[in-house]
Image (tube, helix red, strand yellow):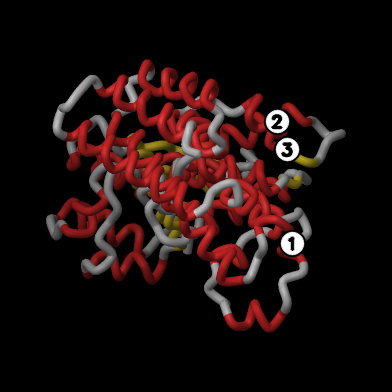
Amino acid sequence: MGQFYLIYGNDEQAVKKKASALAAKITEDKSLCDIETVAGDGAKYDEIIQEFINDLQTPPFLTPEKLVFLRYFAYADKFVSNSDELTMTAVELLLNLDESIHVIIECIQNAPDMRKSTAKKLKNIAAIEICDTVKSTDKNFQTVRADLIKEKLAAEGKSIAPDALRFLVDTLGSSSGILDNELEKICTYLGSNETEITLDICRKLCARTPESVIYFFTGALLEKNLKSALSTLSDLIQSGEAEIRIMASVSNSITDLVKSLNAMAELGVDPARLNPKTFDYIPADIKAQHPNNALLKMHPFRAFKVCENAASWNSEKLAKALKIAADTNLSLVSGNGSPRMLLEQLVLKICTIK
């Protein structure tokens, strides 16, 4: 029996990349396996399935084997739900594939409902690849994303500094297409002689996405760098970034500082004695007492950098910053003033907290 691959998921770029790579691998030797492509969008369902059936029923002509590649299939859920004669003919051909024919179905607009009876039959014979994004709101997003970046870079013989890794995780979002593009750009820039990716390199090369500008803005704000904070705020406003999203990033960043100070206190870390080796020497009994401490789950150097930023604040200053943020947010949602002026006042007030 021929090979049958079903590739789907909500990460469109990853689905396309996986399907194309698989097709290239199967047809690597053109003298052994040819390829016939069926466009799975831009036409009516019946027309697409009929062309698919025709290709499945036609034996290889110039080569011993062939690949039938159903690309951009926009009717995957309909395919596993329908019981009309046309659909069932295609399903039967897949269930009884000739050994000389291989099939890839690439689903990009909607995933098939694998609970349907037809889907269950296909599941028993198909090699299934699911390409889903990890949402940035998911609890383990940062950990999963960081591991993925390190894995991709290791395959290229590269390593990445902890602060550079954090920058990429925080600014590139959940799109695999953007991630792959930025990593390829960085690796190409480094060439074969350099192996470590630094924060300076990332800042120099990575596209100025809204996420990266917000990253620089909140960083400058909480470092009380008034000039940089006002400059990046201006960039955000001019790019059309929603004021409510800017406010959310400010509130989340302040909340993260509060959590970091609490985590430091839980571990008994003295801000006055903080150094890059602090988290390399946390006693084992302290670690055992606080297994869920967020700082212990970070790379030691990243934990140090997080705490270094938090150490310049205390509970009184953070309370003031939270109140400023809350008051600004209230003014924004109630329309009490120009959004730009309100955000600039927020920057001025937070950067001058004593």
Residue highlighted by disc 3: 198
Q: Is residue 341 above or below residue 90?
A: above
| Residue 62 in view in this figure | no
Residue beneath disc 2: 201
Identify whether 68 is placed above or below 41.
Answer: below
Q: Nearer the viewer, residue 334 or 138?
A: 334
Q: Does the image show residue 275?
A: yes
On screen, residue 95 versus residue 286, left or right, reads left
Pointer 1 or 3: first along the chain: 3
Q: Could you give the CA–CA distance between mark 2 and mark 1, rounded to whole angstroms?
A: 26 Å
Which label belongs to residue 278? Answer: 1
Q: At x 24% / y 42%, what residue is drawn? A: 50
The residue under the point 67% across, 59% down is 299
Q: Amino acid at mark 1?
A: Thr
For the view shown, which residue lies furthest in the right direction? 193
Element at label 3: loop
Q: Is residue 143 left or right of residue 107?
A: right
Kind of residue at disc 2: Ile
- What is the CA distance from the residue labelled 1 to the residue labelled 3? 21 Å
Please give the name of the residue rendered at 60% of the width and 56% of the height, measured from the top-left corner: 147
Asked if marks 3 and 2 touch (Cβ < 8 Å), the reply is: yes
